[in-house]
Amino acid sequence: MAGISLEAENAFFAARAQPRVERTHDVERAHQVAEDFEAFFLGQFLQPLFADLSTEEPFGGGLAEDMWRTLQVDEYGKAMARAGGVGIADAVLKEILILQEAQ
């Protein structure tokens, strides 16, 4: 993110932290955490694909465009995960349940 201070960039990326897995007996909650993780992963995976897109005048470009595009790609990841994703949530849910049964 060119032109943004290090402190602002760190705060921006800290707000996009990966989901935390907490102990739960609710399978629906575990499924939601797994889907959130898949959404986070897909958003991170898609970021480089959109990083070098040029913007058109008069409304494109600048710092706001960089931040908006990052948030837009995160929403693409969430939409993909809600629509069934690529199977990451299923694998993560399986591991969450295995780890919780072991404890």
Image (cartoon, grey):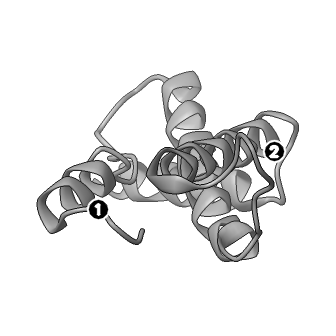
x then y, percent, for residue 50: 73, 67
Q: Nearer the viewer, residue 6 or 46?
A: 6
Question: Which residue is at 76% across, 69% downward?
Answer: 53
- In the structure shown, which secondary structural element does the residue marked by tag 1 occupy? loop
Relative to residue 87, is residue 9 drawn left or right?
left
Question: Which residue is at 60% across, 35% downward?
Answer: 31
Crowding near the residue tagged with mark 2, few <14, some 14–19, many ≥20 C-alpha atoms within 10 Å: some
Q: Nearer the viewer, residue 95 or 47?
A: 47
Looking at the rendered image, the quarter that the N terminus falls into is bottom left
Relative to residue 84, is residue 3 drawn left or right?
left
x then y, percent, for residue 29: 49, 26
Q: Nearer the viewer, mark 2 or mark 1?
A: 1
Query: In the picture shown, does residue 77 fall above or below 4?
Result: above
Residue at the far front: name it: 58
Q: Nearer the viewer, residue 13 or 66?
A: 66
Residue topped by disc 2: 80
Examine the image and state in which quarter residue 25 appears: top left
* Residue type, mark 2 in image: Met
The alpha-carbon separation of the residues under discs 2 and 1 comes to 29 Å
The mark found on residue 69 in the picture is none
- In the structure shown, which secondary structural element does the residue marked by tag 2 occupy? helix
**Are dots 2 and 1 in contact, CB under 8 Å?**
no
* Residue type, mark 1 in image: Ile
Instruction: Tell me which numbered mark, 2 or 1, is placed earlier along the sequence.
Output: 1
x then y, percent, for residue 51: 65, 72
Query: In the picture shown, does residue 49 fall above or below 22?
Result: below
- Can residue 12 be seen here? The reply is yes
- Can residue 93 be seen here? The reply is no
Relative to residue 36, is residue 79 drawn left or right?
right
x then y, percent, for residue 33: 50, 39
Residue topped by disc 1: 4
